[in-house]
Image: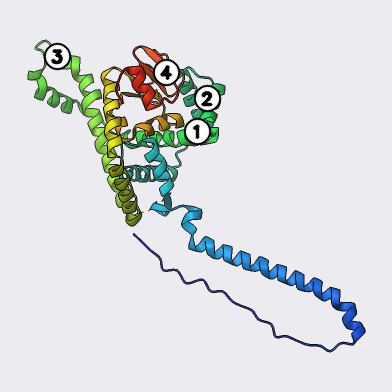
Amino acid sequence: MVTNKKEPVKLKVYTHEKKTVKKHAHEVKGEKHKKKSNKVLLISLIAVAVVLIIAGIAVYMNKDKFFGKVAASVNGEKILLSEVNERFDLYQGAYTKEELLNQTIMEKLLLQEADKKNIEISDEEFNTFLTSLLEANSMTKESLNARLKEQGITYSEFEESYKQRLIIEKLLLEIIKDASVTEQEIADYYASVKDLLPENVTFEEVKDEINQTILLPQKQNEKFSEFIDNLFASSIIVINQELMQEEKQEISEVTSSVSDVSDKNAALAKCLTEKGAKMYGASWCSHCANQKKMFGDAFQYIDYVECDTTGQEECNSAGIEGYPTWTINGQKYPGETSLENLAQLSGCSY
């Protein structure tokens, strides 16, 4: 943890010597109201100045409350604890806060590197992606906007989030574009596994598959790992270890106090999966996040399908129109559902 010693705030108090001026009785009477008005104005100005000074000190002394607690910085760019907590709420049960902080640090590094390389996503590229996303989810832009509004997400937030994801994807493609596999490497690999293949399978029949599904991904991973190692080595990353330790301790205390509930939730989650129940959702869906939070750590036992990316085809086949949607005993149940109701619908105990 890096701390900078701050100079104490100094307040200057200005005093004015009292000056008395003898006046004739008629002069005093004529200026009485004027003095009173000036005095009221002076007191008001002093009061405003004092309020501003106190407010300034309050902001200085409690800047974390105003600007957020800093969990880490990546080349001078801050990562607030609130960012980590938002991800923790979304993926609760799957990742620790330390893991999510590392994930956020990685994203910051990649976005910074993309910025250095002037990698951007044009409006045309984003619109092409959006069209594909809408078609895959059988949605229109109007229905998407309505869904986002329901989730408390603005369209600009949605667009920014996906543009960042697309920028990172474009950077990764540039990193691995030079990865290649030689014919000799494919032949050597074929020779090493030939005895495990059916006798009638020839080198020509499997060489493309060996290249595309095994050797090329390995080369790409090596390229990416080398790039990341160099990126970390050339970056300045400062983690607020004390703050993260406090967060870890707080989570530990909360977890220990609700262990009975966790066991109960885990039993329900396992039962739902055993009975073939599935939850369909999307990463940007706040109602899905709420549903996950109901299970807590036990959500890891739920058969969950991410319709936003990897599970688009399955979601389309299942006729999923909104998130979250549960399928239980062949029936669809859209929307957030209490754990008690899930137990009743599935026949599980809770």
Q: Nearer the viewer, mark 4 or mark 3?
A: 4
- Residue ID for mark 3: 202
Q: Which mark is residue 158?
A: 1
Q: Position of residue 116 (x, y in %)?
A: 43, 46
Q: Is residue 62 left or right of residue 168?
A: right
- Residue ID for mark 2: 144
Q: Nearer the viewer, mark 3 or mark 1?
A: 1
Residue sitting nearer the eye, 266 or 288: 266
Find out whether the residues at labels 3 and 2 contact each other: C-beta distance under 8 Å. no
Q: Position of residue 182 (x, y in %)?
A: 21, 28
Which quadrant of the figure contains the C terminus?
top left
Q: Using a 10 Å C-alpha cutoff, classify the residue at mark 2 as few (fewer than 14 neighbours), some (14 to 19) or many (20 or more).
A: some
Which quadrant of the figure contains the N terminus?
bottom left
User: What is the CA distance from the residue labelled 4 to the residue labelled 1?
Assistant: 26 Å
- Residue ID for mark 4: 333
Q: Label 2 amino acid? A: Leu
User: What is the CA distance from the residue labelled 3 to the residue labelled 2?
Assistant: 50 Å
Residue at image location 36% in from the left, 33% down from the top: 173
Find out whether the residues at labels 4 and 3 contact each other: C-beta distance under 8 Å. no
Q: Secondary structure at mark 3?
A: loop
Q: Give whichever of discs 4 and 2 has the lower sequence position.
A: 2
User: What is the CA distance from the residue labelled 4 to the residue labelled 2?
Assistant: 20 Å
Residue 38, quarter of the rendered image: bottom right
Q: Position of residue 156 (x, y in %)?
A: 54, 35
Find out whether the residues at labels 4 and 2 contact each other: C-beta distance under 8 Å. no
Q: Label 1 amino acid? A: Phe
Q: Give whichever of discs 4 and 1 has the lower sequence position.
A: 1
Q: Label 4 amino acid? A: Tyr
Q: Is residue 316 left or right of residue 96?
A: right
Q: Secondary structure at mark 2?
A: helix
Q: Which mark is residue 282?
A: none
Q: Give whichever of discs 3 and 1 has the lower sequence position.
A: 1
